Structures are given as C-alpha cells and as structure tokens.
C-alpha cells in the first residue's frame, strides 16, 4: 500500500477530509519550495501537489501560470525537482504528487522519469494533458514501480466518461469544480453536490475537489460532499506576495492550519477572525 492510499485510509478512519495543497516547484526557489513542503507537512497538510513548471500551462490561470514563468526563469528543471523531493524524503513521509504536463516528462524520457521519480519518493503523477486513452506509453513504466496515476474529472464529464476514467485511475480522483482554468472563479456548491453524487455512484476511489477554493469557509462547505479539497492559487499568490519576507513560512503555515481546522471539525463554527488578515484578498482567487 502506497503513501496516498495509506493517508486516505487513515483519514477515513478518523472521519476526516484531506487537505491537498498545490505548490509550484521553484517559486521562488527550489530550496524555498523544500522549506515550504516541510512546513506544510507540520501544519497538517495531507497531500502535496508539486507543480512542474511548464511554458504553456493550458489548465492554469494567471496566478499559477505566472509562478511557472518565474520558476522557469530561475532555471528550475524536472531533474532538479526530483532531487529536491529526494531531499524531502529524508525527513518527511507526506504523500507527494507531481502535477504538470506531458512534454517535460516526454523530453526527460518516460522510463528514466519513472525510475528516477520512484527513487526520489514521488507517490503519484497528475498529467493534465494526458487522458487515459493516451497514457499507456507512460504508464508502462510508472505502474510497475507503484506510482499512482491521478486522473481529472470535469463538470461536463458524462457517466460513461467518468466510468472510463475511474476504471484506469489509481490513488484518488480530482474533480474540477468549475469549467475554466485555475484561480478564475468560485465553484457553485449545488453543482459540486450533484456531480459528486454522480461520481461516488460510479467509483470507490477517494475524490477530492479543486479549482476555485481559497477560504476555510468554502472548504468547510464543500468537504461534506468530498474526500478532500485542493487549494493551489491562493497559496501560490501568498507566496508571490510574501516572497523574500521573514514571515513567509509562518504565514503559509497558519493559513494551512486554519483550512485544516475547517475540515477536521465541521460542526464547529469557523473562527473567521483568525483568517481575516488574508481571507478578503483570497476570495477572488482560487485553485
């Protein structure tokens, strides 16, 4: 049993929902990303998605796209990201999913990537532009070494399509709560509830909801219908705004703690005063 399955099993036994956080690797630098990963692990984050910067991130909105550009200008490479994860693994057992696009993996070499990613401690991959029908070329190498293939489900996916995606997915499923790119609009709770009921009727895999979530209150509202929530753009924006400041790590950690609290005890009224310093700025941003 891999780290991802183990983590979701542990959360299920505790009646707890997963907090999945996305970071763009190398923004503002790989050493800082490493520091952020360890801090978020301590803050209670359950799964980390580590974005591999790409020049043409078609699924990402302006916040994450800009982070990718900053990381690429800083010289970040897939090889460097895997080296960073290998260093993290000497300290942390937090499940790590590489999130990105197929081109960097293809250029690196599928077989070489699978071996290196496994050796580094990568638990799963989510390749945005690689649907199940076209994934065999990569999965012939990643499946045997035990790297989970995380798949996306869109609000527009019909039941037949959901069934096909679920049949080939491992680890967990990622439900995209809006039509559009990351960080551009808020999801509608009624839509999430209706589509999550459809997905849960088709697959036993854990399902997390992402795109458009940025506050503890949103997280608490969505969590009853999912196995977890994903936040990306809000974290990436906070990192951009506070890059180079001494309070970056405490600020990011405090935000993660408040989101996690909203998922752990949903019967308790959320203390919005504790997040007032950033919630107003984050409401218009999402992941």
Image (spheres, rainbow, N blue to C red):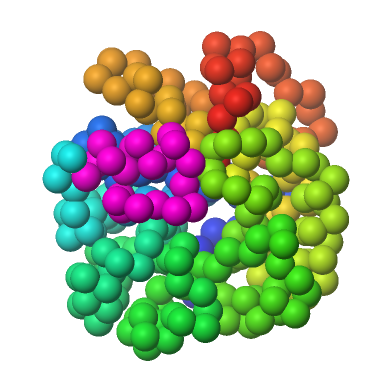
Give percent across and percent down for residue 248.
35, 22
Q: Quadrant of residue 158?
A: bottom right
Residue 5 visible in the shown view: no
Residue lying at the far left of the rendered structure: 75
The x and y percentages for residue 179 are 65, 51
Q: Is residue 182 left or right of residue 147?
A: right
Q: Is residue 13 above or below residue 131?
A: above
Q: Position of residue 25 (x, y in %)?
A: 30, 45
State whether residue 97 is above or below residue 142: above
User: Residue 207 colored magenta?
Assistant: no
Q: Along the line of sight, which residue is nearer the eye, 88 or 65? A: 65
Quadrant housing residue 130: bottom left
Quadrant showing the C terminus = top right
**Is 108 on the left or on the right of 270, as rendered?**
left
In the rendered image, is residue 225 in sight? yes
- Residue at left 55%, top 18%? 281
Which of these two is toward me, 50 or 17? 50
Q: Residue at x 79, y 28 (%)?
A: 268
**Which x, y percent locates residue 148?**
46, 72
Which residue shows up at 47% across the image and 47% down it? 60
**Numbered marks: total:** 0
Residue sitting at x 77%, y 41%: 188
Seen in the image, is 178 located left or right of residue 86?
Answer: right
Up-down relation of residue 178 to residue 259 (above or below): below
Which range is magenta?
Answer: 53-72
């Amino acid at each position: 049993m891999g780290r991802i399955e183990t983590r979701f099993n542990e959360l299920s036994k505790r009646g707890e929902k997963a907090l999945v956080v996305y970071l763009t690797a190398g923004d503002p630098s790989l050493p800082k990303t490493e520091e952020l990963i360890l801090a978020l692990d301590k803050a209670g984050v359950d799964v980390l998605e580590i974005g591999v910067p790409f020049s043409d991130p078609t699924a990402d909105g302006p916040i994450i796209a800009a982070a990718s550009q900053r990381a690429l200008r800083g010289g970040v490479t897939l090889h460097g990201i895997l080296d960073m994860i290998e260093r993290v693994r000497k300290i942390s057992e937090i499940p790590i999913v590489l999130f990105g696009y197929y081109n960097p993996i293809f250029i690196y070499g599928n077989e070489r990537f699978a071996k290196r990613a496994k050796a580094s401690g990568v638990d799963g991959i989510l390749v945005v532009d690689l649907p199940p029908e076209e994934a065999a070329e990569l999965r012939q190498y990643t499946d045997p070494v035990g790297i989970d293939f995380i798949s996306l489900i869109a609000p527009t996916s019909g039941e037949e399509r959901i069934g096909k995606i679920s049949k080939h997915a491992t680890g967990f499923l990622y439900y995209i709560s809006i039509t559009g790119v990351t960080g551009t609009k808020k999801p509608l709770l009624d839509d999430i509830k209706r589509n999550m009921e459809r997905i849960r009727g088709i697959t036993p895999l854990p399902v997390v909801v992402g795109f458009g979530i940025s506050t503890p209150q949103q997280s608490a509202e969505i969590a009853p219908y999912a196995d977890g929530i994903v936040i990306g753009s809000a974290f990436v924006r906070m990192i951009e705004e506070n890059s180079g400041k001494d309070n970056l790590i405490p600020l990011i950690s405090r935000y993660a703690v408040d989101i996690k609290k909203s998922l752990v005890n949903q019967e308790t009224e959320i203390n919005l005063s504790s997040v007032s310093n950033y919630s107003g700025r984050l409401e218009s941003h999402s992941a």
